[in-house]
Amino acid sequence: MINQVILIGHVGRAPELRKTQDGKGVLNFSVATTETYTKNGEKQSVTDWTDITFFNPAQFQIENITKGTLVYVQGKLRSRQYEKKTGEKSTRYYVQASVVLVMNNKVDTTVPNIPATPNMSDLDSEIPF
């Protein structure tokens, strides 16, 4: 049997860091994935929201996963049974992540101004042999 989920999407809900009873960190957030397709000649899109639970996140991940961040998530699909306030039983599905990678960051990504390639005759005068 295989239970493997891979998602690439944007963080939709600001991550919430909690601690388990034994003090381990748990990061909870949601990821939005959008599928675009054409139906009757018109572009359509559907966005799915997936809850993510990530145990023992690194400090880097805690600081850099914010709402809107593009992330790669790999993990297993899990379900949890619970009872609503009305007494009705329900099931919640989520991904228990084993890998979460930040695919973009808020660092300035502009290309630096690189000077033009020097004239080869200028280089010849600097070579000592």
Image (cartoon, helix red, strand yellow):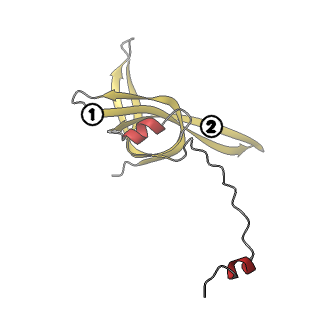
Q: Nearer the viewer, residue 114 or 24?
A: 114
Q: Are marks 2 and 1 in contact (CB under 8 Å)?
A: no
Residue at 71% over, 62% down: 115
Q: Name the secondary structure under disc 1.
A: loop
Spot the residue most to the bottom.
129
Spot the residue most to the top.
86
Q: Name the secondary structure under disc 2.
A: strand
Inspect this view and state whether residue 50 appears: no
Q: Amino acid at mark 2?
A: Val
Dividing the picture into quadrants, the one containing residue 116 is bottom right
Inspect this view and state whether residue 109 appears: yes
Q: Position of residue 85 (x, y in %)?
A: 38, 12
Query: Can you identify the residue that label 2 sits on?
Result: 46
Residue at 69% over, 82% down: 124
Residue at 60% over, 88% down: 129
Dividing the picture into quadrants, the one containing residue 60 is top left
Q: Is the residue marked by circle 1 packed among few (<14), some (14-19), or many (20+) residues within 10 Å?
A: few
The image's mark for residue 24 is: 1
Q: Is the residue marked by circle 2 packed among few (<14), some (14-19), or many (20+) residues within 10 Å?
A: few
Q: Amino acid at mark 1?
A: Lys
The image's mark for residue 74 is: none
Dividing the picture into quadrants, the one containing residue 40 is top right
